[in-house]
Image (cartoon, rainbow, N blue to C red):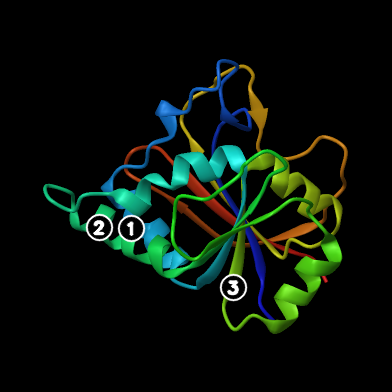
């Protein structure tokens, strides 16, 4: 059975973007990005909300000229994976291997996990909150940036109790701290 992974870059106070929707402070440096790439290699399918998909589709059209090897590597990882975008308003997708679903259905995710040969990643705090509330997320990967933004979109939902065990941790040269938690059995 595939694992459902929620991975997010967040501020120390737990936000994926600030109150103005900005997340420029979260751009990973080469060291962090290379680490992310290694973790993303296990992912065969990305589940996105429409806002995160709009940001991530950048990787579909990235011109490799002048890009770092780490960025090119990530683009190749992203392009090779399937993508499911949950949106009631998006009419079409702008990337290969991508489809739209109108409603997030926990039963469909359970079936996807049972049938998938590779891990599944859920992205976007709102969509991830739905998956967390439904008890579907197996692993939590947080990259905490050394900044306090004071408000915005919370990386984790307020109204859930979720017992976890620490699997891995790492500190990077730029002050980012990575923690990997797994749902307690």
Name the spot of residue 22 as percent of width and height, x first. 49, 23
Quarter of the figure with the C terminus: bottom right
Task: Provide the secondary structure element on which disc 2 rests.
Answer: helix
Element carrying mark 1:
helix
- Number of other residues with Cα within 10 Å of mark 3, as a class: few under 14, some 14 to 19, many 20 or more: some
- As drawn, the residue found furthest toward the front would be 91
Front residue of this view, candidates 1 and 54: 54
According to the picture, the residue beneath numbered tag 1 turns out to be: 75
Q: How far across and down, in percent of the image, does residue 183 sit?
A: 76, 63
Query: Which residue does the numbered mark 2 point to in the structure image?
Result: 72
**Contact between labelled residues 2 and 1, with CB atoms less than 8 Å apart:** yes
Mark 3 or mark 1: whose residue is earlier in sequence = 1
Give the CA separation, mark 1 to mark 2.
5 Å
Compared with 55, 104 (above or below) is below
Q: Residue 70's spot in the image, x, y percent?
A: 25, 56
Return the disc, 2 or 3, that comes first in the chain's sequence: 2
Residue 33 located left or right of residue 123: left
Q: Which mark is residue 148?
A: none
Q: Within the image, what quadrant is residue 124 found in?
A: top right
Numbered label attached to residue 119? 3
Name the spot of residue 167 as percent of width and height, x first.
Answer: 61, 65
Q: CA distance from mark 2 to mark 3?
A: 21 Å
Residue at horizontal 79%, vertical 48%? 130
Q: Residue at x 56, y 67 (%)?
A: 45
Along the line of sight, the residue nearer the viewer: 15 or 181: 15
Query: Which quarter of the figure is the N terminus placed in?
Result: bottom right
Work out how far the residue at label 3 is from the one at label 1, CA to CA, in angstroms: 18 Å
Say if 179 sits above or below 37 in the image: above
């Amino acid at each position: 059975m595939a694992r459902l992974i929620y991975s997010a870059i967040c501020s120390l106070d737990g936000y994926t973007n600030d109150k103005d929707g900005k997340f420029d402070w979260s751009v990973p440096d080469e060291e962090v990005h290379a680490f992310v790439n290694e973790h993303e290699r296990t992912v065969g399918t990305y589940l996105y909300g429409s806002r995160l998909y709009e940001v991530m589709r950048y990787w579909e059209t990235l011109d490799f000229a002048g890009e770092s090897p780490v960025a090119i590597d990530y683009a190749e990882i992203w392009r090779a994976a399937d993508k499911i975008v949950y949106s009631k308003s998006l009419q079409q997708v702008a990337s290969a291997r991508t489809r739209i679903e109108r409603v997030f259905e926990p039963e469909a995710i359970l079936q996807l996990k049972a049938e998938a040969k590779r891990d599944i990643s859920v992205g976007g705090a709102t969509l991830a909150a739905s998956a967390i509330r439904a008890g579907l997320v197996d692993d939590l990967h947080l990259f905490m940036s050394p900044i306090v933004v004071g408000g915005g979109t919370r990386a984790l939902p307020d109204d859930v109790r979720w017992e976890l065990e620490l699997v891995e941790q790492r500190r990077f040269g730029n002050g980012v701290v990575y923690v990997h938690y797994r749902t307690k059995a």
